[in-house]
Amino acid sequence: MERIYKDSSQSQPKFKMRHLPKLFMKAAKIWNANNPWRLGAVVAYYAVLSLPGLLIIIINSVGAIWGNEIVRGEISSEISEAIGPDTAQAIIGIISNTQQDNRTLFSTILGVAVLVFGATGVFYQLQISMNEIWGVKADPNAGFVKVLKDRALSLAFVMAIAFLLIVSFVISTALTVVSSYLSQIWQPEFVSIAQVLEFILSTGILGLLFVLIFRFMPDMEIHWNSVWLGGFITALLFNLGKFLLSLYFGISEPGSTYGAAGSVVLVLLWVSYSCLILFFGAAFTRVYAEKYGPKLRPQEHAMIVENKEVIVENGSKRAK
């Protein structure tokens, strides 16, 4: 697909809601051209490897404020709702087995380092996939500094998720109290207002996470105004997909065929399918940014990939 580069002197077109169908169609072409099934499978594989470390960091970070047991219960509930109670129990069991207190100082330090490296692996691979959606790649000559920067960014996303979980828990607790109070003084149909409000707020928090991913994950200089719409559209699609996937897993039980490995297979399927929605949102954000946003350019130590050639910002070209 032809890349759009605007001259800074050109006036930018204004987005209107009637443009959405055309933007969706263009996004679908970019999404399909980048083989999202392959990208989703890669991220899903690394998600399984990163899941224990990722959840341990989140549980300990959020648990320092909210309490480890409460956080563990909330995460277990979310996993159970999305994939099933057996998978949730298996994942929580893995986390419990990795948190042993009878370790030396050296093994603890080494364990923390391995934990951080493992937890950031899925975001590192997600960044590579985002770069493919955006048609950009890291400069292979960037060296260790680029890898270290990307790992630090991945760790920042882990902590951002922990922070958003804290906010989500506070909001959910407040809405639960409000809903319980309203159920005593209002008719049941009015209580649904609190439930709708909880859905809107949870979608907003999820949308904020996607906005951060679309803004910082690709190796492109993307303006904030270019990512808000794509982030919240992705959040809506993600919640819809989460509901449909829970129905699919509940009816077909695809993990039952694999016996003891069923929990791992369900995680792979859930992450892979969810990534399809995430990558579509990234493709939509790219289309929106190219049409309505400021001029795009690759970040330092990155280069645009186009027509099997790498186009460096100064205009020179090198073969892929």
Image (cartoon, rainbow, N blue to C red):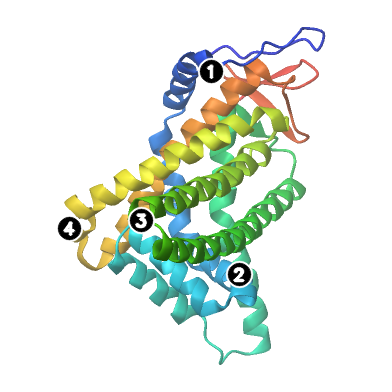
**Along the line of sight, the residue nearer the viewer: 267 or 105:** 267
Residue 257 badge: 4
Q: Position of residue 223 (x, y in %)?
A: 73, 30
Residue at (64%, 53%) from the top-left corner?
157
Left or right, 74 with respect to 171, comes to left
Compare residues 219 and 193 and report the one nearer the observer.
193
Residue 187 has which mark?
Answer: 3
Q: Is residue 101 left or right of residue 244?
A: right
Q: Is residue 273 visible?
A: no
At x 78%, y 34%, the residue is 300
Callout 4, which amino acid? Thr
- Dot 3 or dot 1: first in sequence order is 1
**Is residue 267 positioned above or below 141 on the image?**
below
> In the image, residue 26 lies at what x, y percent?
48, 17
- Determine whether the residue tagged by mark 2 lies in a helix, strand or loop: helix
Tell me what residue is drawn at x 45 percent, y 61 percent. 182
Mark 3 → mark 1, Cα distance in angstroms = 37 Å
Looking at marks 4 and 3 on the same chain, the residue that comes earlier in the sequence is marked by: 3
What type is the residue that disc 1 sits on? Met
The three-letter amino acid code for the residue at tag 2 is: Val
Q: Residues within 10 Å of mark 3 (few under 14, many from 20)?
A: few
C-alpha span from label 1 to label 4? 45 Å
- Label located before the other in sequence (2 or 1): 1
Between label 3 and label 2, give the one nearer the viewer. 3
Q: Is residue 64 above or below residue 10?
A: below
Give the residue pinned by disc 1: 17
The image quarter containing residue 62 is bottom right
